[in-house]
Amino acid sequence: MQTKQIKGQLPEWMWGAIDWIFPPHCLGCGLEGEIICPECYGTIKRIPANVCPYCNAYVSTSGHCPSCKNLKPSYARFRAFAFYGGVIREAVHQLKYQNDIGIARVLAGYLLKVIQAENWEFDLVVPVPLSKRKQEQRGYNQAERLARPVAEALHKPISVEGLSRIRENASQVDLDVKSRRENVRGVFEADPAIVKGKRILLIDDVFTTGATLESASRALRDAKSDLVYTVTVGRSDFNIN
Ligand SMILES: [Zn+2]
Ligand SMILES: [Zn+2]
């Protein structure tokens, strides 16, 4: 078992000791000391300012891209921390498959930078859920691992019951935007008793075409939530227009 997996099973107050005995190594260059060292942090491709507020595709003038104008999403805004590549891709991969809470906290810190820069006002943090079966297989939901430290830092409540994934969708690979939206339609269900009248911050790990976020947001809006802001760590370079 690796150190990070041991850490996932211990209370947080013991992590400092674990880090002292087995210091983390940078995911980008292997340097001992930090999960992402300052030099590798500097290589991260941040999302620039002139992007579509719904999908973060480049736009030449301010406003939304042609594709989001046609198919306006149900969420109010979307912002990713960075493009999905390099050390960010590696970190998200580890978050998903290695049960590494240390990485979750680092990435949650990156999400906080985005949320604070956007100045969004919201009442409730909601992670994009996995299906019950998938969560049982993996043992945890990576989006929840990101959402908990965010909620804690901003002193906001978090709900994992407010939104559920009621069925699995077929693989999204090789589908275009419209087919992806069809494929994930109706996979989520929100509980009006929890989300009604609330401004929601919806958190996920990666945005590819936005089909999953759109479907989750649609369920929250159908359950009468007030509005939904969406944020992810990575945004795929996949051209969605
Ligand atoms: Zn490094
Ligand atoms: Zn767009």
Image (cartoon, helix red, strand yellow):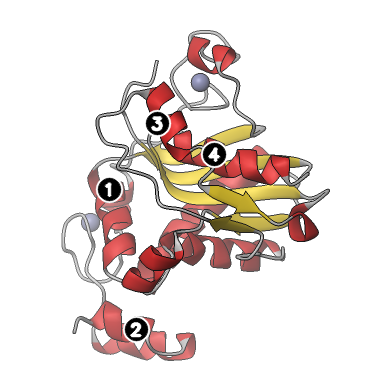
| Label located before the other in sequence (4 or 3) | 3
Name the residue tied to disc 4.
215
Which residue is depicted at the point 45% across and 30% down? Answer: 182
Amino acid, disc 2: Lys
Q: Earlier in the sequence, mark 3 or mark 1?
A: 1
In terms of sequence position, does the residue under pointer 4 or pointer 1 come before the other?
1
Tag 3–tag 1 contact (CB < 8 Å): no
Residue 47 appears at what percent x and percent y?
44, 32
Residue labelled 4 has its Cβ within 8 Å of some atom of ligand 2: no
Of the residues shown, which amino acid type is indicated by label 3?
Arg
Q: Looking at this rendering, what residue extends furthest in the left direction?
A: 30
What is the tally of numbered marks visible in this picture?
A: 4
Circle 1 is placed at which residue position? Answer: 89
Mark 4–mark 2 Cα distance, whole angstroms, equals 34 Å
- Element at badge 3? helix
Which label's residue is closer to the chain start, 4 or 2?
2
If you read the primary sequence from the N terminus, does the residue marked by circle 2 or circle 1 appear first?
Answer: 2
Q: CA distance from mark 3 to mark 2?
A: 36 Å
- How crowded pointer 2 is (Cα within 10 Å; few <14, some 14-19, many 20+) is rated as some
From the image, tell me which residue sits under label 2. Answer: 7
Give me the residue at 48% from left, 89% from top.
Answer: 13
Q: Residue furthest right?
A: 197
- Asked if disc 1 is less than 8 Å from ligand 1, the answer is no
Q: What amino acid is labelled 4 in the image?
A: Ser
Q: Looking at the figure, which quarter contains the C terminus?
A: top left
- Per the model, the C-alpha gap separating discs 2 and 1 is 22 Å
